[in-house]
Image (cartoon, coloured by chain):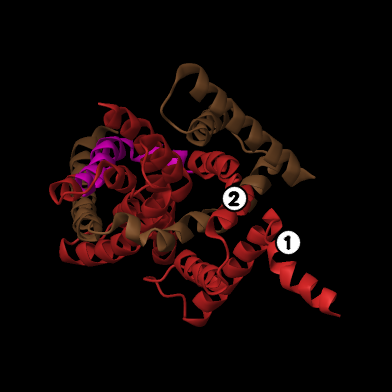
Amino acid sequence: MTELISRFMALPDVLSASPLFAIGLTLGAFFAGNWVFARLGKPLWMPPVLLSAVILSAVIAVFTIDYVRYQEGAHWLTLLLGPATVALGIPLYQQIHHIRALWVPIVVTLPLAATMAAVYAVVIAWAMGATPEVLASLAPKSVTAPIAIGITEQLGGSVALMMGGLLITGVVATLFVDLLAKWLPVEDERIIGFALGLNGHAIGTARAFEISHAAGAFSSLGMGLTGVFTALILPLVFRL
Amino acid sequence: MSMLRGFLILVVFFLLGEALRVLFVIPVSGGVLGMILMTFTLMLRGRVSDDLASASQALISVLVLLIMPGVVGIFFLASHFSGQWLAVSAALLLGTFLSVLTTLLLMKCMLRMTARGGADD
């Protein structure tokens, strides 16, 4: 009997050695986060990814799960980000006809606005004394997560800090677009959608699809082009 | 089976992107290079196969799950960046406000200009 108890006590250690433990934990938190999100009435300022991450962190902290071991196991999941990034090329291709219809405004706005999205943040943080590691983590803040992870790794920033910045940027970009569109005013749903995707990546795009299908299409386009453009330009600029 | 075939295509494009990155020392991740290759290939072919469509939809719909382990890290390194949170918050809030303003104004001006000058379009 005492042997059974001692084996039972060792169980958490044995189970958590398998990557499947980390994967199960992540999946469980993912569904829990989505459930809470639906229960709260799908609030814009609290995206499901943030809810799921808070739940997951709480479980890791409460049960004193080894964080490094968790990340090693979860690596089996994050590996899929590579092919998932490639998969983003398919919706991008499906939006190509929008570029053909409005290519002049897009070709002029995109490089300028996507560059400024990174420059404003980096200059403000630099002026306030942030370290190079923090600057490298903030630079891709308007880029969709799978691409931004690749950029931050190339620049030598912290993926965790970047992900936090990304979430906050997505949420506040959505609020600012709503606010400024009323104030300027901008009524064209294509412009609003484009601004949502360019600045607020996937979180902005989720909001754009609530406005209209056209806004959503332009938001996906803005998100995709910003991701590609920033991924190509930032590493070159940071090298200098 | 169809989804797995599509997944194989995605993995092959990712590996092609990685190969390009290593061969030409490009400072861009293999995933992004693979995505660009994918977009151009589709533009040349002019259509998306069902295999590829189902695999990409499946992966994109679970993107949140894939980025969660990265997000969790933020709660475990708060002390590592102590003293810099004010700079980070200012950069995120003010920076995003300015970049949203820039995008809206630029797009508005450009659309107005092309609407006026594009009568011969």
Q: Is residue A14 above or below residue B110?
A: below
Number of numbered discs visible in the structure rendering: 2
* Front-lying residue, A150 or B38: A150
- The amino acid at mark 2 is Glu
**Sequence-earlier tag: 2 or 1:** 1
- Majority SS type along the magenta span: helix
Q: Is residue A135 left or right of residue B17?
A: left
- The span from disc 2 to disc 1 (Cα, nearest Å) is 15 Å
Q: Is residue A81 left or right of residue A189?
A: right
Residue A57 shown in magenta:
no
Q: Nearer the viewer, residue A96 or A198?
A: A198
Q: What residue is rendered at 32% in x and 34% in y? A: A234
Q: Which chain is brown?
A: B
Residue lying furthest right in this view?
A: A1
Disc number placed over residue B89 in the picture, else none: none
Q: Which residues are magenta?
A: A95-122
Indicate the chain on which mark 1 is placed: A
Residue type at mark 1: give it: Val
* Residue B60 screen position, x and y as percent: 57, 51
Q: Where is residue A239 drawn, in percent x and y? A: 29, 27
Mark 1 highlights which residue? A14
Q: Residue at x 25, y 26 (%)?
A: A240
A202 relative position to A102: left or right: right
> Which residue in the protein does label 2 denote?
A72
- Magenta-span inclusion, residue A118: yes
Q: Report the residue at 27% width, 59% height from top.
A: B82
